Image (cartoon, rainbow, N blue to C red):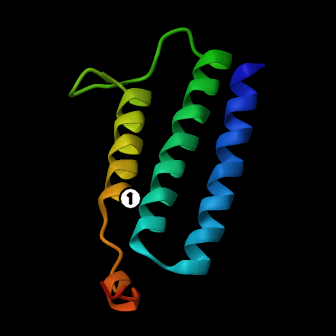
């Protein structure tokens, strides 16, 4: 039950992020969209594992659980979204006389 709620909420966040990116077309929103894509994929993979598989899915060469890789990519995307410079923000800022 909880996995279904997690998949649903991650897909809602994905739709919201996609709408924001289509509206703003900024690199921050792109990385947020990617983060929510990875979150959705991770939750779908975990739900499928819970329902249909007994053992977790691993990447054979690295021996890594695939949801951990997706979680890492999500974390990396969030970090990139937080550290991106907003281009032109300083040009639009008003100066305050001292």
60 displayed left or right of 47: left
Residue at 64 percent across and 42 percent down: it is: 10
Note whether 17 is above or below 74 in the view shown. Answer: below
Q: Quadrant of residue 85?
A: bottom left
- What x and y, as percent, mark residue 13? 65, 50
- What x and y, as percent, mark residue 4? 74, 28
- What x and y, as percent, mark residue 33? 51, 59
Q: Quadrant of the N terminus?
A: top right
Residue named by callout 1: 81
Q: Nearer the viewer, residue 91 or 59?
A: 91
Q: Nearer the viewer, residue 94 or 47?
A: 94
Q: Quadrant of residue 18?
A: bottom right
**Mark 1, residues whose alpha carbon is within 10 Å: few (<14), some, or many (≥20)?**
many
Residue at 40 percent across and 49 percent down: it is: 78
5 displayed left or right of 67: right
**Secondary structure type for disc 1:** helix
Residue at 21 percent across and 26 percent down: it is: 62
Which residue is farthest front? 98
Q: Nearer the viewer, residue 98 or 27?
A: 98
Which residue is farthest top? 54
Note whether 89 is above or below 76 in the view shown. Answer: below
């Amino acid at each position: 039950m909880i996995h279904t709620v997690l998949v649903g909420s991650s897909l809602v966040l994905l739709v919201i992020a996609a709408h924001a990116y289509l509206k703003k077309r900024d690199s921050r929103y792109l990385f947020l969209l990617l983060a929510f894509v990875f979150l959705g994929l991770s939750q779908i993979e975990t739900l499928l594992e819970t329902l249909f598989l007994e053992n977790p899915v691993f990447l054979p060469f690295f021996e890594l659980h695939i949801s951990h890789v997706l979680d890492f990519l999500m974390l990396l995307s969030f970090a990139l979204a937080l550290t991106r410079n907003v281009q032109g923000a300083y040009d639009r800022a008003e100066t305050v006389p001292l």
